[in-house]
């Protein structure tokens, strides 16, 4: 075990857990430079997609999906032994697979906000909602440059209207309170993460962040890990990576695009 019982209990209660340093500053710097190589089209291979989530020039959030398919260093990252073991412990599973990864980069001065949302409702082709995400900062993520905030305990409240929570002018969540347990306090927790540190969150935890108007960029890599029992369950809506799924509806989701990274106490062969 890497985690203590109290850390696992904290994650189960709050829906997120900051672990601390998982790689050196130089390793994070190298991943950040590889990220820029992919964004600028200099990498040997291509990811699933590279887009500006906002579609605005003055509020830019660059999203890369499955950068691990474009760059060997990011491919190694999804197999990080500490991260994979922690994911296994948080999900209480012997088998961990990758659903997909996601880089989000908020450039200096013009970085856009992260609207309040839950992850799993945006993944309508997989069940159950038992995934965790490992969010690694590739530069210090602070309130000033648009770090994430989490709403404590919100993973216990179920899906919220397709995942979208709503955001006010101060970038605080504006949920439909009829979908929240009566008497619930919306407890927003800013989560600053230093370069090379990792934070985990549950796929139903509400999270969001302000724009980046600072002089420093906010690059981060999130890997969405799923326990071995997650299945392909298409329900009408689609997903960006669904075309990579090779199993039949109802079957365990696995295959070359959804690699097994942890199995029976060890990093899987790759």
Image (cartoon, grey):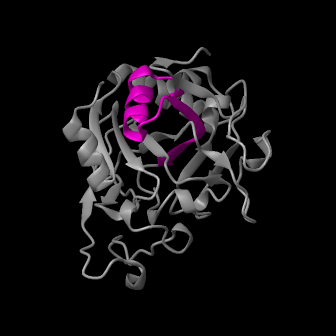
Q: Where is residue 264 shown, x and y percent of the image?
A: 49, 21
Give 162 or 129, whichever is nearer the viewer.
129
Q: Which of the 4 quarters of the picture holds residue 125?
A: bottom right
The answer to whether 203 is drawn above or below residue 31 in the figure is below
Give 16 or 13, whichever is nearer the viewer.
13
The answer to whether 270 is drawn above or below residue 109 in the figure is above
For image coordinates 55% across by 27% down, the residue present is 34
The answer to whether 159 is drawn above or below residue 26 in the figure is below
Q: Where is residue 203 shown, x and y percent of the image?
A: 47, 53
- Image quadrant holding the N terminus, namely top left
Query: Is residue 252 rendered to the left or right of residue 196?
Result: right
For image coordinates 58% across by 48% down, the residue present is 63
Residue at the top extreme?
A: 269
Give 264 or 55, whichever is nearer the viewer.
264
Give 165 or 184, whichever is nearer the viewer.
184
Q: What stretch is highlighted in magenta?
A: 78-106
Q: Where is residue 54 shown, x and y percent of the image?
A: 57, 63
Query: Is residue 131 rendered to the left or right of residue 126?
Result: left
């Amino acid at each position: 075990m890497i985690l203590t019982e109290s850390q696992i209990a904290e994650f189960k209660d709050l829906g997120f857990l900051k672990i601390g340093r998982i790689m050196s500053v130089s390793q994070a710097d190298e991943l950040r430079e590889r990220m820029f190589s992919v964004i600028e089209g200099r990498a040997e291979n291509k990811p699933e997609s590279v887009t500006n989530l906002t579609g605005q020039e003055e509020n830019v959030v660059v999203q890369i999906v499955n950068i691990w398919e474009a760059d060997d260093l990011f491919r190694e990252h999804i197999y990080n032994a500490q991260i994979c073991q922690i994911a296994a412990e948080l999900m209480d599973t012997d088998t961990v697979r990758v659903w997909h990864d996601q880089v989000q980069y908020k450039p200096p001065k013009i970085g856009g906000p992260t609207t309040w949302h839950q992850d799993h409702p945006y993944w309508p082709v997989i069940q159950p909602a038992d995934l965790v995400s490992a969010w690694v900062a590739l530069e210090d993520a602070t309130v000033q440059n648009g770090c994430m905030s989490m709403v404590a305990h919100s993973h216990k409240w179920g899906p919220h209207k397709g995942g979208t929570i709503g955001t006010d002018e101060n970038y605080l969540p504006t949920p439909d309170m009829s979908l929240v347990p009566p008497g619930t306090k919306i407890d927003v927790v800013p989560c600053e993460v230093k370069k090379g540190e990792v934070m985990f969150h549950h796929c139903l935890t509400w999270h969001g962040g302000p724009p980046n108007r600072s002089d420093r960029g906010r690059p981060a890599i999130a890997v969405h890990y799923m326990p071995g029992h997650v299945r392909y369950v298409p329900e009408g809506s689609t997903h960006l990576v669904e075309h990579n799924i090779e199993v039949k509806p109802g079957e365990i989701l696995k295959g070359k695009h959804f690699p097994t990274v942890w199995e029976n106490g060890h990093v899987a062969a790759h």
